């Protein structure tokens, strides 16, 4: 494969960004380095693409995008809860986290309950409080860490594959917040659509809590690949694209 130069996908919606990135990976024999996906409207989907991909996931026994997204932001669970109640009900003993966690946890747990020296840090809550409490708009001050250096920075496979999130603020009426997500490893056939969906909903939540406008989502994959790259998946992508 080699270390190829960056390839950029620029699309209006989650769905179009995903399918165009998958097309690129198919052309690249199923994997690529340095894939940049820029989504201008990261809470917008194409219903037809989503429906066809959902059906493919059911047929192949893959997690549906909504289930992947839930590990980043629990959309349905968050509905009707304010921020304080969401953090509490998700992370409390017997709460949603304990019911859905994987072997290493979930992204939303790391975002809202990252343990440092045995004490939990709510990175998301701290950032929202800082944005709301500062008179000045700081364009590059807010980062959410996911991986734990001691245990996870040399792990060959398995989660967490998301390294960190950075918020990108721009002045406007209202102010605009975008997001950069950096992945060390990202499966576009089984996880990336759900990743985009969860990240977009997380960004929507942050903007709601800070009275800001939703900006773009940029997703960088150090190594992007297709776990499913057989005729069925290729046919799905080509059919969506009309090839």
Image: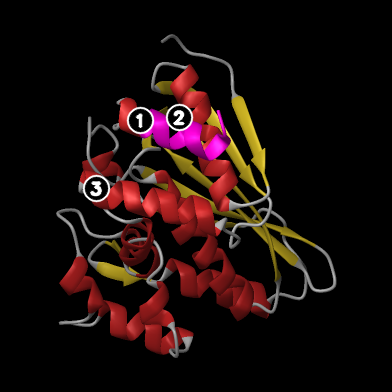
Which residue, given by chain and number where applicable, does mark 2 sit on?
222
What are the residue bounds of the magenta stretch?
Answer: 233-243
Which of discs 1 and 3 lies nearer the camera? The answer is: 3
Circle 1 Cα neighbour tier, 10 Å, few/some/many (<14 / 14–19 / ≥20): many
The reply to whether discs 2 and 1 touch (Cβ–Cβ < 8 Å) is no
Measuring 54% from the left and 73% from the top, which residue is drawn there? 205
Mark 2 / mark 3, whichever is N-terminal = 3
Return the x and y of residue 37 as percentages of the image width and height. Answer: 58, 39
Give the Cα distance between marks 2 and 1: 14 Å
Outermost residue, right direction?
173
- Image quadrant holding the N terminus, namely top left
In the displayed structure, would residue 177 be above or below residue 154?
below
Measuring 53% from the left and 29% from the top, which residue is drawn there? 35
Which residue, given by chain and number where applicable, does mark 1 sit on?
226
Q: Secondary structure at mark 2?
A: strand
Q: Secondary structure at mark 3?
A: helix
Say the numbered circle drawn on residue 59: 3
Measuring 19% from the left and 53% from the top, which residue is drawn there? 104
Q: Is residue 87 magenta?
A: no
Q: Secondary structure at mark 1?
A: loop
Circle 3 Cα neighbour tier, 10 Å, few/some/many (<14 / 14–19 / ≥20): few
In the displayed structure, would residue 221 be above or below residue 144?
above
């Amino acid at each position: 494969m080699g270390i190829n130069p960056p390839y950029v996908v620029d699309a209006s919606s989650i769905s179009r960004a995903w399918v165009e990135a998958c097309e690129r990976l198919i052309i690249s024999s199923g994997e690529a380095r340095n894939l940049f996906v820029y989504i201008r409207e990261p809470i917008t989907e194409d219903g037809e693409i989503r429906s066809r991909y959902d059906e493919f996931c059911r047929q192949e026994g893959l997690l549906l995008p909504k289930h992947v997204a839930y590990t980043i932001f629990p959309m349905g669970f968050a509905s009707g809860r304010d921020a304080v109640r969401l953090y509490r009900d998700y992370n409390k003993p017997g709460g949603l986290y304990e019911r859905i966690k994987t072997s290493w946890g979930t992204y939303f747990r790391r975002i809202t309950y990252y343990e440092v020296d045995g004490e939990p840090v709510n990175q998301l809550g701290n950032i929202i409080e800082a944005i709301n409490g500062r008179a000045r708009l700081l364009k590059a001050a807010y980062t959410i860490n996911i991986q734990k250096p001691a245990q996870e920075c040399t792990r060959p496979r398995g989660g967490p594959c998301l390294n960190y999130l950075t918020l990108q603020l721009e002045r406007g009426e209202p102010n605009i917040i975008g997001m950069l997500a950096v992945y060390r490893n990202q499966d576009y056939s089984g996880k990336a659509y759900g990743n985009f969906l969860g990240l977009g909903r997380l960004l929507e939540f942050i903007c709601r809590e800070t009275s800001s406008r939703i900006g773009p989502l940029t997703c960088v994959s150090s190594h992007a690949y297709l776990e499913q790259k057989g005729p069925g998946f290729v046919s799905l992508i080509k059919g969506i694209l009309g090839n």
